[in-house]
Amino acid sequence: MKRFPLWACVCVAMALACAGPALSVSSFTPPAIEGRPEASAAALATQTNPMTLLLDARQASRGLMSARLTVPVKAGDFTLSYPKWIPGEHGPTGPLHDLASLRISALGRALPWSRDATDMYSFHISVPSGVDRLDVSFDVLLNAPGDVMSTKNIAIVNWNRDLLYQADTDSHQVFVRAGILLPLGWDFASALPGARRDGNRVDFAQTSLATLVDSPLDCGSYVKHIPEWSHDGATAQLDVFADRPQDLDIPEDVINAYKATVPQALALYGARHWEVYHSLLTLSDAIGTQGIEHHQSSDDRAADGFLVDEKRQLASGDLLTHEFSHSWNGKYRRPADLTTPNFQVPMRTDLLWVYEGMNQYLGDLLSFRAGIRKPKEYPEYLAALYASMDYEPGRETTPLIDLTTSAPYLYQAEGDYASLRRTADDFYTEGELVWLDVDTIIREGTDGRRAIDDFLHIFAGPPTTAAMTATYTRPDVERLLGSVMPYDWHGFFARYVYAVSLHPPTDELQRSGWKLVYSPKPNEFIEADGANNRETNLWYSIGLILEEDGTVRDVRRGSPAFAAGLAPGTKIVAVNGQAFGSDVPDGEDDPLRYAIRTAQRARRPIALLGQRSKWYGTYDIAYRGGLRYPHLVRIAGKPDMLAKIMAPR
Ligand SMILES: [Zn+2]
């Protein structure tokens, strides 16, 4: 999963789960949890007697779908579960509030149901004798603030939102035949196997419940299917669903860069563990930006002009490459304690510093190697990542391992002072710094003969297999790294992941021939990100992130703005007596940037007038350091290892 932005102090992001037509699970270790939820019940929905699901999506553009299921049962007490822990989202995020109008019947007669008093995702039914199948139907509410799944022209189907299943069963042993009724004239794409279309109805081959939930479907009225790669019957494809037809006029060089992702990923890992792969991309301001990984597809969501706007590619050009890389790192190889037998058993997320942290590095690396972003832009990007982590006050108390362990709640965390709490984005951003450090240690220690690519070849590489999952633990990762190059990898991760570390890993900068400096020149990535998120970053000077209208989004503890008494939510209305927020001509500083830039020669502090609720306040900021933004500059005489790392293979 992936959230945006990555280096601002307030963030958004997410990811999801695995499995193709032939999903099998090796070295599978269900977590030991006493009592329910568990997965030891014999599944009644078998290969010869599957459950069925028909999703009626014809009302999708008004935010409604309805699900009709038939579920094999036997007489007596029976419990249906609504999926709660969603793979890739790494948390109990199943949107229970989107299930409405639940009806259960058998042999044409309505049956009463009751919700469990403590586990609200469970529904109890008493099945009369003579009944071996329930008819279940409910409405699926598609849209909520921050969770928009449909617009007039697009709908995203995450099947976990559309089903109930027999409680306590292993989702790899529950079988289902699914179908969908599409709105008139709409097209669709999905990695779900065996699609047969008849008019507006599409029926799929029977799969396990795990594979169904791992195979989202996008549908819509403005669609472009772009074949990316094929070899020996295996194919990769980009399926773009736009809210506006003009956003499908994708420049040829952009398409070619995305096509280059596949050979670059195959070179990075050395093999594949998918037969088909669909990057399912929606382009819609209403739906927003997010990425969720699956084994043979990804559910990618970006803004209207994502594929035609260079700034958006600069800031978020790793959206698809990040999710694609998860097919290997996350779906094929997955932390043992994150691998659960069904959607009710809690996940343990401590190893997300590998699953997401390493993947943040690899997704970025692939975006630069494929040419979605230019390799020469990486140092500026890296400077932005490094500074954002180095200037986060919460790191004084909170190590990375606490952030991954608490990820299920941290992904949902909102509110003031995110930089003190730290965020789920940190194990992505700092994960990139940790894994770049690993890469440069290997390169330096082997005189350039080996790299992280060699680790990936033994971690998630040959031989090519069908979609399957092999689990790992922290000792496995350290042992495999040791086989690439002997080193105290346990001590390295102990220092940077498992203990409080006042600074992110630093050695990789110098080792790769660069050093970090701050200057008044804006950082390109911070500017691009600020434009996309409509915010101004003054974090490294007076210590503020401002929204477009001047409202303080976060204030850095220990900064001049914090010392002046500013708090999140305060709206700056004047700077040194001059109105703030009025239109600023292109190329000119707004009054606050002007005041910071010229503060060195001013005799008085920067005087802000702020409004919070119905109250005004004045804030004098004693600061003379000018505007400050992070950059990397070359160390004379040292080879440029970053250029080598980001060069296409
Ligand atoms: Zn991810």
Image (tube, rainbow, N blue to C red):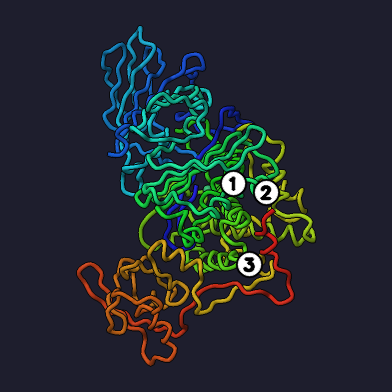
Residue at 49%, 39% in the rendered image:
87
Q: Amino acid at mark 3?
A: Thr
Q: Seen from this angle, which residue lies furthest left? A: 614
Q: Amino acid at mark 1?
A: Ser
| Distance between mark 1 and mark 3 Cα atoms | 25 Å
| Distance between mark 2 and mark 3 Cα atoms | 25 Å
Front-most of 192 and 625?
192
Q: Looking at the image, do the residues carrying marks 2 and 1 touch, with CB atoms under 8 Å apart?
A: yes
Q: Which residue is mark 1?
A: 325
Instruction: Give the label, 1 or 3, closer to the camera.
Output: 1
- Residue 506 numbered mark, or none: 3
Question: Mark 2 or mark 3, which has the lower sequence index?
Answer: 2
Where does the image place residue 116, in percent across and percent down from the top left? 33, 29
Q: Secondary structure at mark 2?
A: helix
Question: Mark 2 or mark 1, which has the lower sequence index?
Answer: 2
Q: Seen from this angle, which residue lies furthest top? A: 130
Where does the image place residue 163, in percent across and percent down from the top left? 39, 29
